[in-house]
């Protein structure tokens, strides 16, 4: 290679290197400028937040409200917040209260509900009566609620509802629930072993089984008063009024329309050795065994403030095995059981 050629090549290489260095420098400057621009972009451009708009549910959740899958829940929860309920109170309302109560709560001003959340038979419409009755009686609020629901904060026979489904085996007949005066069960049948006495068909087989089981335990039971018509009860009650003042008669006899005997589901029974009552031993057997055949001792002792009647060992009421077993286990009156477990609140 001639010397000149080498010089020329050297020249070319030097030129290319310079270009390369310049290019690298420009690249480096661009990188630094880009990074600087990126890091300081907020100083030069007013940044508008591009956060997604929150949904009504998300806003409620942020306030501590547990979402409920119910149509219109967000509107309801917001309405409760406006009334002054806290998130905690709203959560309790939706955890424990029935839809019917929630509707009432939404229709009314704020009320402190903390005493009532866990009371299943609470009825918002009666809240003032509950408070008044508790102030008077000083008993537990759960008992207050049941008693007021049974109208026991009023004198007996003051508020009377007419029973809509009198033929139901679970029908509640008491001093505030009356049977229509013309109600006669359409399925009355004779008790096979006591053909002159009629009861509702639903109860016959179980009653016969009860008699057989009792006999096996040497308990001899005789029914003596079963189905009684409205007019029969009217004459009976009026007859008692000739001997005793009204307030006394009311403790042992039902006014017409208020007797369970009109349902065909009640039986007065006696021991074979007693005219109109059970011996202590037979009563004991009845208290411990009748539920197995669907019967309860309807007016047990120490419950007259609830039932409105003195103890009646002889008066059995058929409600079916399932409910009789529960009433027996819970040791409560049928009135209380009916309000707690068979009434929609
Ligand atoms: Zn009776």
Image (cartoon, helix red, strand yellow):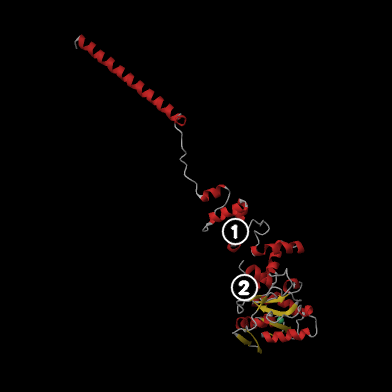
Helix, strand or loop for disc 2: helix
Image x and y of residue 100, in percent: 59, 64
Assess disc 2: are there few (<14), some (14-19) or many (≥20) residues with their C-alpha within 10 Å of its C-alpha: few
Q: What is the number of the mark on residue 37?
A: none
Tell me: residue 12, above or below residue 266.
above
> Which quadrant of the frame does ligand 1 lie within?
bottom right
| Left or right of 54 on screen, residue 243 | right
Closer to the chain start, of discs 2 and 1, is 1
What residue is drawn where x is 42% and y is 28%?
37
Assess disc 1: are there few (<14), some (14-19) or many (≥20) residues with their C-alpha within 10 Å of its C-alpha: some
In the orientation shown, which residue stands out farthest toward the bottom? Answer: 196
Question: What residue is shown with label 1?
Answer: 106
Q: What is the number of the mark on residue 322?
A: 2
Tell me: residue 135, above or below residue 232.
above
- Answer whether residue 82 is visible to the viewer in this image: yes
The residue closer to the viewer here, 330 or 293, is 330
Q: Disc 2 to disc 1, how far (Cα)?
A: 37 Å
| Left or right of 223 on screen, residue 166 | left
- Answer whether residue 123 is visible to the viewer in this image: no
């Amino acid at each position: 290679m001639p010397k000149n050629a080498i010089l020329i090549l050297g020249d070319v290489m030097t030129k290319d290197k310079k270009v390369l260095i310049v290019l690298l420098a420009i690249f480096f400057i661009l990188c630094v400028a880009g990074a600087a621009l990126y890091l300081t972009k907020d100083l030069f451009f007013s940044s508008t937040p591009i956060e997604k708009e929150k949904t009504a549910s998300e806003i409620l959740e942020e306030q501590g409200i547990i979402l409920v899958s119910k149509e219109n829940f967000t509107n309801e929860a917001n309405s409760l917040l406006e009334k002054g309920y806290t998130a905690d109170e709203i959560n309790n309302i939706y955890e424990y209260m029935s839809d019917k109560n929630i509707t009432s709560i939404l229709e009314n001003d704020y009320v402190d509900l903390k005493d009532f959340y866990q009371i299943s038979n609470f009825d918002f419409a009666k809240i003032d009566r509950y408070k008044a009755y508790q102030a008077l009686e000083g008993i537990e609020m759960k008992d207050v609620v049941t008693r007021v629901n049974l109208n026991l904060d009023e004198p007996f026979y003051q508020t009377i509802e007419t029973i809509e489904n009198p033929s139901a085996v679970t029908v509640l007949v008491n001093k505030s629930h009356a049977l229509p005066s013309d109600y006669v069960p359409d399925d009355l049948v004779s008790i096979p072993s006591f053909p002159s006495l009629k009861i509702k068909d639903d109860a016959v087989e179980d009653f016969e089984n009860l008699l057989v089981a009792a006999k096996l335990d040497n308990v001899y039971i005789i029914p003596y008063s079963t189905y009684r018509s409205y007019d029969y009860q009217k004459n009976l009650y009026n007859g008692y009024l000739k001997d005793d003042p009204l307030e006394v008669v009311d403790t042992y006899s039902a006014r017409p329309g208020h007797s369970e005997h009109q349902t065909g589901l009640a039986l007065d029974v006696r021991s074979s050795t007693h005219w109109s009552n059970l011996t202590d031993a037979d009563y004991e057997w009845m208290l411990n065994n009748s539920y197995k055949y669907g019967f309860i001792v309807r007016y047990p002792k120490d419950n007259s403030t609830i039932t409105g009647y003195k103890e009646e060992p002889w008066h059995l009421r058929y409600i079916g095995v399932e409910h009789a077993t529960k009433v027996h286990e819970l040791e409560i009156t049928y009135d209380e059981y009916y309000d707690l477990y068979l009434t929609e609140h």
